[in-house]
Image (cartoon, rainbow, N blue to C red):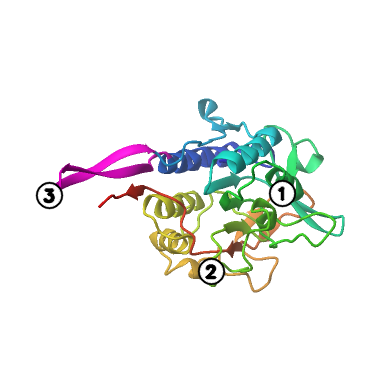
Amino acid sequence: MHACDANPTNITELRYVYWAFNDIYNIFAGRYHYYWVWYWYPYLGGWVRGDPVYGHLTHSMVWNGGDPYSTTTKDNVSDGIKDVEANHPWSSFLYVGHGGMQYFAGSMHYDFFMNGKGKNVSEGQVPFIWDVEIYIANVYQTPTWNNHHFVFLWTCFNGRERGSNEGYFPNGMPYCWTEGQIGPSTDGYASPDGGNYCFIGFDLASPRLEEPHNGPNHLYKHWLVFFYYYAVAQSYSVKGALDRASQIQGFLSFETTKLYIKSTNYPYGSDTYWSGAAGHPAGWYDVWMRVYGDGDYHIPGDIYHYSG
């Protein structure tokens, strides 16, 4: 789990990111291998807990006496990608923060920012990583196993397109994170493609975690944690967890939330307010979460090994 703490980001936003990361970290940390052991074969047996499922968990936020900051750097994101590709199959990645995009080398490319508390992302003061750099970190790791099966980027723009390898450089976060293994579906919620790779990101604006999703008691922070709870702790598919997290907040399903419904006056809607920075004027912007690839994918939770 990685985050950006640079401006425009305030202390309230960072506290909610910290709280969300703590909750999600604990959800993953609580997953174990379980082994069936016969105590008196064949009549009496039970489950015995073994090693954790996730041997490498990262959490980049530091509480700092209530003024949180991020430890995310470009090197530890890149090194983490290489480590996952070499050692950790069926891995997941979560980022919360600021993103950008720029056209170069024949296609649109996307990026997200690192730590830089007190600095401004719009003034070139904060390091960032491009989609093509993520692809390079993946594909030039030896051995490479295409281990990033689920990636969630809670940031602006990074879910705008699937991407491809058709330009001068590979582009698009879904394509680059999975080394091109992401399936063809551009709506993996409604039409899962069965490819065992899933990417979630935002087409335009990502809301702040402290914003209300459905009233003051149902914040985006709660929705995000509920999603991981149902996906990882309760073994729902990505699609099922999107629905359950939304139902907990009073919606009929994910497809009835403003996360899924694209605004009719796109790109400007009434979903989240942007104060104005990074070349985008202040105003209300549309929130449209894109699910690419396989919405039927299951993020590994508890794993049971039964020997009959």
- Residue 131: x and y in percent read 73, 50
What residue is drawn where x is 62% and y is 31%?
71
Element type at mark 1 = helix
54, above or below 272, in the image: above
- Whole-angstrom CA distance, mark 2 to mark 3, is 42 Å
Q: Residue 277 or 187: which is nearer the viewer?
A: 187
Q: Image point 43% across, 63% down: which residue?
A: 240
Q: Mark 2 belongs to which amino acid?
A: Pro
Q: Quadrant of residue 136?
A: top right
The single residue placed furthest to the top in the displayed view is 65
Give the Cα distance between marks 3 and 1.
Answer: 52 Å
Q: Which of the 4 quarters of the picture holds residue 175?
A: bottom right
Mark in the foreground, 3 or 1: 3
Q: Amino acid at mark 3?
A: Tyr
Which residue in the structure is indicated by mark 3? 43
Q: Say if residue 239 shows up in the picture.
A: yes
Query: What is the x, y in percent for residue 284?
Result: 66, 60
The label nearer to you, 2 versus 3, is 3
What segment carries the magenta color?
29-51
The crowding category of the residue bearing disc 3, from other C-alpha atoms within 10 Å (few below 14, some 14 to 19, many at least 20), is: few
Judged left or right of residue 106, residue 277 is left
Q: CA distance from mark 1 to mark 2?
A: 23 Å
Q: Name the residue carrying label 1.
A: 135
- Which residue is pictured at 58% across the width and 57% down the height? 200
